[in-house]
């Protein structure tokens, strides 16, 4: 098929015509009518939203904001905006007013979609700060709208309930816009959260998305009717690009608003797939390891045996080892006694889980390979519409991010920087020609990540060039490697490494307080406050022992020599992490300068 046939809107219209009453969108624990949305209803709702936007004066390639948690309305607003040939600009619902106003003003957006009362209040403030912002559309019908804004503020459900016959002019205009739609239209502006400086609007067009969909067809075994759970934020390129793919291939997308309910959602929805980040997998892994640690010796031996069998079976399945009847019989026993229970916790019918956003610790990856829950690690950026490389079911190389998609090229440049070229690579940064020029080298996108390629073309990320730290002894430290190694601990929630221009490595650690307090209770420790608990000699010794175990595979100069336990998490509100949970290291080092200096002055 030619790339034109992969235009997102045309693919979705084909699915709507084919699947009709089948479910396209599902709101987990949401009330009707958004609990279940059929393909026919999805097509109708999104077309009606497009007509509403046209009636509100939205022109071709005008910008519209979506600032909301994951929900079916999010995707209906997304596709409705695209049908009107306007450009969708997502904003993280956790963004501050300052962050949101920068994006709205930079994009000169006309319309904003929001969900709840808190987001509506922000939208009202944004209208005061952003001259271009004319209309606010609210998903939650229980939100009380400002009485003096009746011509500017609307409930989505009210707009959808309006009489269709009054919209003849808008229907005609919509049909004309759909007929004129092409791959060179801008589809979205996604503002990179960035660990430094102002965010930049990444311009992704329909050609980028069409290429991504076609390339995923060549790599993944996703079928019409498969269920995907969308719990990562749709405001991020990973979940949104994946949701486009799921729907364009006739999948059933389930939206989770409250990420604290992910365990319950997986159990109830039983997805065939879901996008994950390493932190999610680390938590599953650490919870299992913690349970095994507390088990009787016989169960520990059974688990260790099952893991060895599972690992051998994985290597056989990948064609890297030879199997046999005895291994097959052992595998059945291991599955029945151990792995089946883990499968049930994860819904029982997972085909694969795309994983990205950061490096996955190899031990965590091997755990999932052994229990036969395929984790397909990939590498990508907002600037590449997510996936550049990925593992596949028949090519899973531990520690790697897989091979490039078939229409994407990669090579290594200066300092082993990963360079990317292909139809999925962004058009550039919005209104930033100098930044766009600086991002490319002879037509290749400079990623800022360093890597290596094995003999089969599998990509291994070695470090983030901009984040490489050099100790005063001249040793280079890749902080994410160390943070990934120790982040698997069930007692560690967050960790930030310090090493640049220092003579040894230290760490700021945010404990997983629920696990730590349970451990302290079990040990009979007495304390009056969180700070007293963190300073308790038994707690400090416990973390020292844990770190010693977790770092045995690291070189001596990479290992954490001293650490400080922090009572408060790194948060977006404090400006210490980005919406994609990346550390803002400069801000962290500034806030905790006293604690850091104390680790080097003693």
Image (cartoon, grey):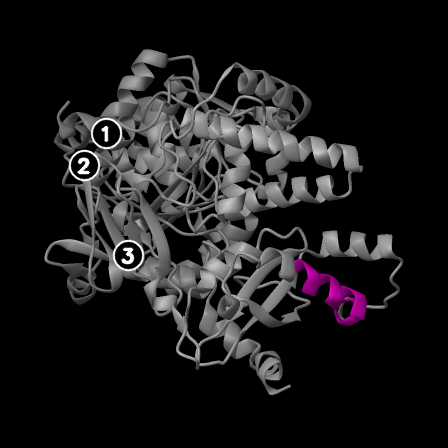
x and y percent of residue 475 in the render?
41, 73
Residue assigned mark 1 = 214
Please report the bounds of the magenta region as a residue range. 532-546
The residue located at (28%, 26%) in the rendering is: 217
Snapshot quadrant of residue 508: bottom right
State the residue in front, 269 or 483.
483
Q: Tag 3 or tag 1, which sits nearer the N-term?
A: 3
x and y percent of residue 477 in the render?
43, 68
The residue located at (26%, 24%) in the rendering is: 11
Residue assigned mark 2 = 407
For numbered disc 2, what is the local secondary structure? loop
Residue assigned mark 3 = 201
Disc 1 to disc 3, C-alpha distance: 25 Å
Snapshot quadrant of residue 280: top right
For numbered disc 1, what is the local secondary structure? helix
Q: Is residue 20 left or right of residue 118?
A: left
- The quadrant the N terminus occupies is top left
- Prevailing secondary structure class for the magenta stretch in the rendered image: helix
């Amino acid at each position: 098929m030619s790339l034109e046939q992969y235009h997102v809107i045309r693919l979705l219209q084909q699915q709507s015509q084919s699947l009709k009453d089948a479910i396209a969108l599902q709101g987990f624990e949401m009330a009707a009518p958004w609990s279940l949305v059929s393909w026919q209803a999805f097509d109708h709702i999104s077309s009606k939203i497009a007509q509403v936007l046209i009636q509100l004066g939205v022109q071709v390639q005008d910008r519209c904001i979506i600032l909301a948690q994951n929900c079916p309305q999010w995707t209906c607003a997304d596709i409705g905006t695209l049908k009107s040939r306007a450009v969708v600009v997502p904003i993280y619902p956790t963004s501050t007013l300052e962050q949101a106003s920068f994006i709205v003003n930079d994009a000169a957006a006309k319309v904003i979609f929001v969900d709840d009362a808190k987001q509506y209040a922000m939208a009202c403030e944004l209208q005061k700060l952003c001259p271009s912002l004319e209309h606010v559309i609210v998903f939650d019908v229980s939100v009380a709208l400002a009485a003096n804004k009746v011509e500017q503020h609307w409930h989505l459900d009210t707009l959808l309930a309006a009489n269709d016959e009054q919209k003849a002019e808008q229907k005609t205009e919509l049909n004309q816009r759909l007929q004129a739609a092409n791959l060179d239209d801008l589809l979205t502006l996604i503002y990179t959260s960035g660990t430094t400086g102002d965010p930049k609007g990444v311009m992704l067009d329909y050609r980028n998305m069409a290429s991504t969909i076609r390339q995923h067809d060549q790599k993944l075994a996703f079928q019409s009717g498969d269920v995907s759970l969308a719990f990562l934020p749709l405001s991020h390129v990973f979940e949104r690009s994946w949701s486009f793919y799921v729907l364009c291939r006739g999948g059933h997308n389930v939206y989770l608003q409250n990420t604290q309910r992910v365990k319950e959602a997986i159990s109830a929805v039983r997805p065939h797939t879901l996008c994950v980040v390493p932190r999610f997998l680390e938590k599953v892994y650490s919870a299992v390891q913690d349970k095994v640690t507390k088990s009787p010796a016989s169960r520990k031996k059974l688990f260790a045996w099952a893991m060895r069998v599972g690992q051998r079976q994985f290597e056989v399945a990948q064609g890297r080892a030879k199997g046999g009847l005895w291994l097959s019989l052992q595998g059945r026993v291991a599955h029945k006694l151990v792995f089946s229970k883990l499968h049930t916790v994860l819904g029982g019918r997972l085909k694969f889980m795309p994983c990205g956003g950061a490096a996955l610790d190899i031990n965590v990856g091997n755990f999932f390979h052994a229990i036969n829950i395929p984790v397909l690690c990939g590498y990508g950026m907002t600037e590449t519409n997510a996936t550049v490389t990925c593992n596949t079911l028949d090519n899973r190389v531990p520690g790697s991010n897989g091979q490039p998609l078939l229409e994407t090229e990669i090579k290594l440049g200066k300092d082993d920087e990963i360079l990317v070229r292909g139809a999925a690579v962004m058009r550039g940064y919005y209104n930033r020609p100098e930044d766009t020029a600086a991002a490319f080298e002879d037509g290749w996108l400079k990623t800022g990540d360093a890597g290596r390629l094995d003999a089969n073309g599998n990509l291994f990320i070695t470090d983030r060039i901009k984040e490489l730290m050099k100790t005063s002894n001249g040793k280079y430290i890749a902080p994410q490697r160390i943070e990934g190694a120790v982040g698997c601990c069930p007692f560690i929630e967050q960790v930030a490494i310090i090493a640049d221009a220092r003579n040894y490595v230290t760490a700021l650690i945010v404990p997983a307080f629920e696990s730590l307090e349970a451990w302290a209770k079990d040990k009979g420790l007495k304390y009056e406050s969180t700070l007293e608990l963190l300073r308790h000699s038994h707690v400090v010794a416990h973390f020292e022992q844990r770190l010693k175990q977790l770092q045995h595979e690291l070189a001596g100069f990479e290992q954490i020599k001293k650490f400080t336990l922090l009572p408060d998490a790194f948060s977006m509100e404090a400006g210490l992490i980005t919406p994609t949970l990346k550390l803002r290291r400069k801000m962290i080092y500034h806030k905790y300068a006293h604690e850091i200096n104390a680790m080097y002055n003693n």
